[in-house]
Amino acid sequence: MYGHHLFDLFKTFSRKEMTRFHAFSLSPYHHKHEETRALIAYFSNIYPTFDGRNCERNHIWQHLFQDRPFDNAKLSVLFTYAWRLAEEFLVQEQLRESPLPQTLLLSALRERGQKQLFERQLKKSKKYLQQLDLRDAHYYQQVISMAGEAIEFYGVWEPKRENQSVLEKESALDQYYVLEKLRDAVSLQVRRQILKGDYSARLLERILEELRTDPEVYGDAPAIRVYFNLYQMMEAPSLEVYRRTLNIFQGNEHRLQQQEVTHIYIYLQNFCIAQINRNQQAFLRELFGLYQAQLARELLHEDGYLVEWHYKNIVTTAIRLGELDWADHFIEAHRGDLAPESAENAYRFNKAAYWHAVGAYGKVLELLTQVEYRNIRYSLGAKALLLRTYYELGEFEALHALVESFRQYLQRNRLLADFRRGGYYHLFRLGRRLAKLRAQLPYLPKEQGKQRLAKVRTDLEATSPVFNRIWLEEKMNELEAQQ
């Protein structure tokens, strides 16, 4: 296969984008090289199969030039031309979704001295902005750019005319600056939790102080309110602050672009997960609500398909909450929403998790034998599910063998993050101790059994991270109740 970055780029294109790129290449304004057009037409015809023989140099050459002798240098030149055209196409696609063209038009009219046309276009652009519900960074950029053009225009053509352009620009600049600082501050808060290093931001404290002292200064700037509350939530975590932040955000979702909305949901989602990992179980219900809100808005989809990991996380959350009927309905109802290449694997794994939750352990083992473990998430999740299933079935020999194989698995997988490695390691370690103790308890003096159970509980309480901690605690409680 011809290893060229064009193929990597084309794999990210939708069918609509590939068709548009082909049409773009046919425009004589952009490009007139017939052989490059033929190459791009070939790419459009083979879309989306950019692999195998389709992408071999000799095959491409024969398609373009039939019986002419293969010329690798010429084909390389055509690929270079096609890449440059693809770059230009991407820029044009971004411009279609950007507010920049309106500002560029104003700039062109101003530079050409078209006073009436400029004023007409400025009025039209302002009216368009006023009608927008959006109040995000892109909105402020538009106001700043348009006000800047108006300042330049009136400074030359009507310097004595009173206009509000400078005040409009200053107000928008303030709001844009504060918003961007807050967005960065939230991002830095996340980085501090993941990476070591100094992630302080100069001047941020002055902005925070102004917002704390007089929050109504930016009361008409919903994005600022949302990010300020996100920052406070991360700085001093609590259920009350989380719920206040969520209410403010969801009340202003319609004033933010979808990409921004998606990012904020991810911040809230990760915050809930972090609190759950700290044993703040009230956030489990909050996380469930976030998933449902995102499902309703199709924010958990990519390329029209529900992402399999969101599918898994939603099922896991519902099961942990005891929403078993809901989980089963969700697994079946959204099976068809998954990408075809991952649908069956995701379905089997999550159905196995459901059968475990309702105690149908034989069905769990049957389904897990059909799951492909090419992805480490499925591999780890399936092993943890097997551990719990063997425990429930009293299959202690199989459980001990699984724990030993898992220990070797962890030794081989050095790239596994420390938190994840530790969480699974302690689950399997403590799971084996409980299983061994469960098998021995009927033959131990009652007092000795209580002492051993107390040691395991002390170990569990002192250990972090431990995945499936609640399950381990339930099994501990069951054994203690038998003493």
Image (cartoon, helix red, strand yellow):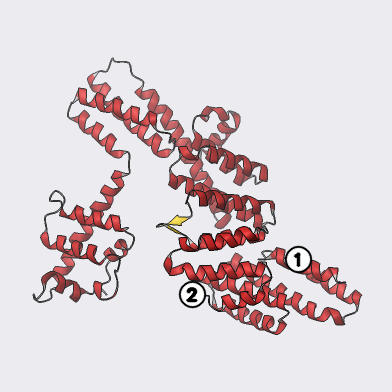
Expressed as whole percent of the image width and height from the top left, the position of residue 4 reads: 27, 68
**Tag 1 near tag 2, CB within 8 Å:** no
Expressed as whole percent of the image width and height from the top left, the position of residue 480 reads: 84, 69
**Drawn side of residue 249 relative to residue 318, left or right:** left
| Residue at image mark 2 | 374
- For mark 1, does the 10 Å Cα neighbourhood hold few (<14), some (14 to 19), or many (20 or more) residues? few
- The residue closer to the viewer here, 299 or 148, is 299
Q: Residue flagged by tag 1: what amino acid is it?
A: Glu
- For mark 2, does the 10 Å Cα neighbourhood hold few (<14), some (14 to 19), or many (20 or more) residues? few
Q: Is residue 445 above or below residue 325?
A: below
Q: Is residue 263 above or below residue 218?
A: below
Asked where in the image residue 107 lies, by quadrant, the reply is top left
Q: Residue flagged by tag 2: what amino acid is it?
A: Arg
* Residue at x-position 65% and y-position 52%: 285
Residue lying furthest left: 68
**Drawn side of residue 61 relative to residue 344, left or right:** left
| Residue at image mark 1 | 474
Asked where in the image residue 442 lies, by quadrant, the reply is bottom right
Report the Cα–Cα distance between label 1 and label 2.
31 Å
Query: Is there any visible trace of residue 81 in the rendered image?
Result: yes
* Residue at x-position 18% and y-position 26%: 113
Q: State the quadrant of the C terminus.
A: bottom right
Mark positioned earlier in the residue sequence (1 or 2) = 2
* Residue at x-position 46% and y-position 45%: 260
Q: Secondary structure at mark 2?
A: loop
Expressed as whole percent of the image width and height from the top left, the position of residue 54 reads: 24, 72
Query: Is there any visible trace of residue 198 in the rendered image?
Result: no
